[in-house]
Image: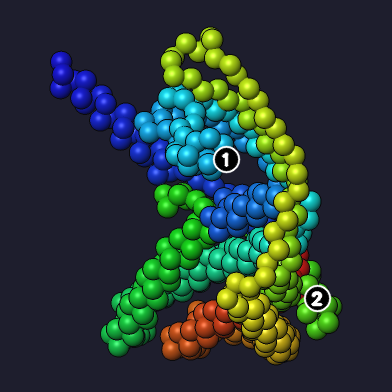
Amino acid sequence: MKSYHILIILFVFSLGQQIKAQEQVTLTLDDAINLAKQQNIDISISQKQFEISEFALKESKGNFLPKLSASANYNRNIDRQVIFLPNGFGMSGAATELGSDNDYRASLNLSMPLFSKYNFVNKQFSENRLDFQQEVSRGTEQSIVNTTKKAYFNYLIAQEVVMVQQHRLNNASETLKDIKKRVKQGILTEFDITSARVQVANATTNLLEAKNSIVPAANVLKLVLGLSPDTNVQLTDSISILEKELLMNESIKSMLKNNSRLKQLELDISIAETQIKMAESAYYPNVDFVGNYVYQAQADDFEVSNYDWVHTSLVGLQVNIPIFNGTVTNNKVQQAKISKDIAEKEKAYATDQYRMRYQEIMTNLNFSLQKTEVQKENMELTAEALALAKKRYNLGVGTFLEVNDAELSYTQSRLSWLQAISNYKNAFYDYQLLIGNDLN
């Protein structure tokens, strides 16, 4: 009976694993982008970091609010405190004990900053950090969208390459069958059969290589989208270049204004400026309002109900004026100024770098678009040439070598066309990332 139950459990577990393994997701490009925004780990981390910055800003604002604390303590005086009174009090300068064996004390302490240069600058620093983290989140999302688009179409093209190689193998196999028939008829020789078999072997090898690239391409897409490795992903968009992917109207000036990385570097400079002010705030005095309320009693016994409880209270102002701290503040200010210089140099260098990158991408886009058009025309021509070569072969006026050459030319031209489209799309997605604009 136990064995029967174990078999049922194993069967249910196996069935569950099979169902999980057969999970399928059908995605358009927009679906993939939305899924990446929801599930990508990098986007999730950047959002958490933004939340941390939000709480840091709230923390800095909390420094302006009053602070109230309560404390209570009991002391058992083993040796009581003493006071030495002068002879004029009739005590001959002897030590006089004070207090009782038991000391009870409870207090409320209030403090509120009235002026603190550090608090004002720290709030500004937290605001700058929040703006910076918000821009980091924006840049991370744009980067993931860029990666998603590339992974989506790389997977599409990998599938298309498999179909091209499969078509090539099918044609080579059909040609081999036809040649065998013609050899039996005495029209062709064993040499033609051997040549055809070589073509079938080559086509099979190319197909296997194409299929081998499918898994890595699929895994990259699944990883970006946060999908399980067992998920079967089906893509629905076409490979063709869309009309909106031909729009490139953003100028260098607009790119320098909207690029996320450059914005982050600009905010780095603002943060460095705030850090200078924060270091300099140590030169300024601090003024606090303070208050204190104490409720206390002392006795030599533990009859609490009979204690004489008294209370004392005070309010006042507390001023802390820095005079000398061993040049610590000055050194901190100098460090902050150097950090600002570094941030400015990084911004200037990145600006020049992105100017050059913009020119490179625009040149690459124009070149890739022209290459795509040329490869498409070449593919159409090789398709016509292949049809004519097959027609001549069927009529008996063409040779197997002509068909084979035409087949290879067509396959190569289609693969070149796919590569040209891939190059253009990748360049266009990099262009979108560079200008800081996500055009879905």
Which residue matches tag 2? 257
Quadrant location, the N terminus: top left
- Assess disc 2: are there few (<14), some (14-19) or many (≥20) residues with their C-alpha within 10 Å of its C-alpha: few
Hey, which quadrant is residue 250 in on the image? bottom right
Task: Say if 221 sits above or below 269 in the image.
Answer: above
- Assess disc 1: are there few (<14), some (14-19) or many (≥20) residues with their C-alpha within 10 Å of its C-alpha: few
- Secondary structure beneath label 1: helix
As drawn, the label of residue 88 is 1
82 left or right, relative to 360: left
Q: Nearer the viewer, residue 186 or 232?
A: 232
Residue type at mark 1? Gly
Residue 189, percent from left and from top: 31, 86
* Residues marked 1 and 2 touching at CB (< 8 Å): no
Quadrant location, the C terminus: bottom right
288 left or right, relative to 196: right
Q: Residue at x 53, y 9 (%)?
A: 305
Residue 388, percent from left and from top: 58, 83
Q: Earlier in the sequence, mark 1 or mark 2?
A: 1
Q: Residue at x 18, y 20 (%)?
A: 4
* Residue 159 seen in this snapshot: no
Q: Residue at x 60, y 72 (%)?
A: 325
Q: Nearer the viewer, mark 1 or mark 2?
A: 1
- Secondary structure beneath label 2: helix
Task: Say if 9 sits above or below 152 in the image.
Answer: above
As drawn, the label of residue 158 is none
Residue 371, percent from left and from top: 67, 87
Residue type at mark 2? Lys
Q: Residue at x 78, y 56 (%)?
A: 115
Hey, which quadrant is residue 351 in on the image? bottom right
* Residue 70 seen in this snapshot: yes
316 left or right, relative to 227: right
Q: Nearer the viewer, residue 68 or 414?
A: 68
